[in-house]
């Protein structure tokens, strides 16, 4: 009977040695462990970036919030876009059904992300599901251009918009808290929806926009003048303004609080938050043959103590 050692030796001799494929290098596992440069894990930034891409709806490209839907193949989309695709996955065209992607919703709940207005100065980091609410109220979010009469899409902070209004829209720029403006139109019948040039006032270290335009109030043609504050509503409430128009011993006076440019000029106009002058009265104040609009609007801005 063969000894145990001779039997073991014969087994070793029968082992076939397989050479690695030519052109492929081999590496001892010990080398990887001793050389950290051989394996470089992804940074947290890149991992978070990849997860954020997964949370982007393929239809509207916005961030997805619960309920996040998925098809049987695992493709996801937001609840707002599900009706728009007629219950068909936009990626593979399979029927969506009512499958929730709970795993992705839980992953999202674990994320903390910077505010999207970081470039405008917001340094906050917020949980994924709180981020949208913060951004809707973030004091650093940019403002829309307040110019009326055109669909200007420019956004930015106040100093940028002031330069934009001056250079691109050629608005009237004035220093001081009082004003005396004259609005003229040779044929008032042609100005049902006319908008006069915006005027920007600089006072108290702030900027204000004076609007004047014609529009239809129900069936009656009217003119409206109002002031907007270039800043947030919380700061606008620190100021008051008055507007006055008149002639021949009669006058109309309006006193109010300027609205923030967070509210569009159309929103302010349609809420009638300003000095409203009916056309007949405006023509009366214009004097002459009552066929030409010549309105003089005076006003004052002051700060509440």
Image: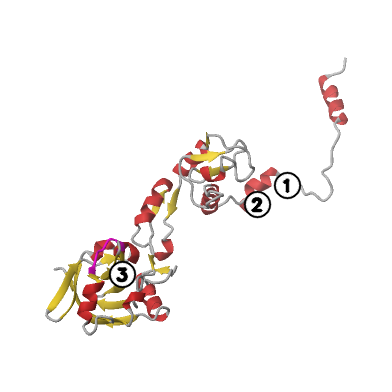
Which of 242 and 68 lies nearest the eye of the viewer? Answer: 242
Q: Residue furthest front?
A: 289
- Lower sequence index among marks 1 and 2: 1
- Name the residue at 84% across, 42% down: 19
Q: Is residue 250 left or right of residue 122?
A: left
Q: Which mark is residue 188?
A: none
Q: Is residue 47 depicted above or below 278 in this figure?
A: above
Q: Looking at the figure, which quarter contains the C terminus?
A: bottom left
Q: Is residue 124 left or right of residue 184?
A: right
x, y percentage for residue 217? 29, 64
Visible in this render: residue 176? Answer: no
Q: Is residue 31 depicted above or below 290 in this figure?
A: above
Q: Looking at the figure, which quarter contains the N terminus?
A: top right
Q: Which mark is residue 38?
A: 2
Where, by quadrant of the figure, is residue 97 drawn?
top right
Which of 207 and 6 lies nearest the eye of the viewer? Answer: 207
Give the CA separation, mark 1 to mark 3: 65 Å
- Lower sequence index among marks 1 and 3: 1
Which of 126 and 232 lies nearest the eye of the viewer? Answer: 232
Question: Does the CB distance between marks 1 and 2 fall below 8 Å?
Answer: yes
x, y percentage for residue 257? 21, 66
Q: Is residue 205 left or right of residue 118?
A: left
Where, by quadrant of the figure, is residue 303 drawn?
bottom left
User: What residue is disc 3 on?
Assistant: 230
Residue neighbourhood size for the residue with mark 1, other residues' Cα within 10 Å, grouped as few (<14), some (14–19), many (≥20)? few
Q: Which mark is residue 27?
A: 1
Residue at disc 2, secondary structure? helix
């Amino acid at each position: 009977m063969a000894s145990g050692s001779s039997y073991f030796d014969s087994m070793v001799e029968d082992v076939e040695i397989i050479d690695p494929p030519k052109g492929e290098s081999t590496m001892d596992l010990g080398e990887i462990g001793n050389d950290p440069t051989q394996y470089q894990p992804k940074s947290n930034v890149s991992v978070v970036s990849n997860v954020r891409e997964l949370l982007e709806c393929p239809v509207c490209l916005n961030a997805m919030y619960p309920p996040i839907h998925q098809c049987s193949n695992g493709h996801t989309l937001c609840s707002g876009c599900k009706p728009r695709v007629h219950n068909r996955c936009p990626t593979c065209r399979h029927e969506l059904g009512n499958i929730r992607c709970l795993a992705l919703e839980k992953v999202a709940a674990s994320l903390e992300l910077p505010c999207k207005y970081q470039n405008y100065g917001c340094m906050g980091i917020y949980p994924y599901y709180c981020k949208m609410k913060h951004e809707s109220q973030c004091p650093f979010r940019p403002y829309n251009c307040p110019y009326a009469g055109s669909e200007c899409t420019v956004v930015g902070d106040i100093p940028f918009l002031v330069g934009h209004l001056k250079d691109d829209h050629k608005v009237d720029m004035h220093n001081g808290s009082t004003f005396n403006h004259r609005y003229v139109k040779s044929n008032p019948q042609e100005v049902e929806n006319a908008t006069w040039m915006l005027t920007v006032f600089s006072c108290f270290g702030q900027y204000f926009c004076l609007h004047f335009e014609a529009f239809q109030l129900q069936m009656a043609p009217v003119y409206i003048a109002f002031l907007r504050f270039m800043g947030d509503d919380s700061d606008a409430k620190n100021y008051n303004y008055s507007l006055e128009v008149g002639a021949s011993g009669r006058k109309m006076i309006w006193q109010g609080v300027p609205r923030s440019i967070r509210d569009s000029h159309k929103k302010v106009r349609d809420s009638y938050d300003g000095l409203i002058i009916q056309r007949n009265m405006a023509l009366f104040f214009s004097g002459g043959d009552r066929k030409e609009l010549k309105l003089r609007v005076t006003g004052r801005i002051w700060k509440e103590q």
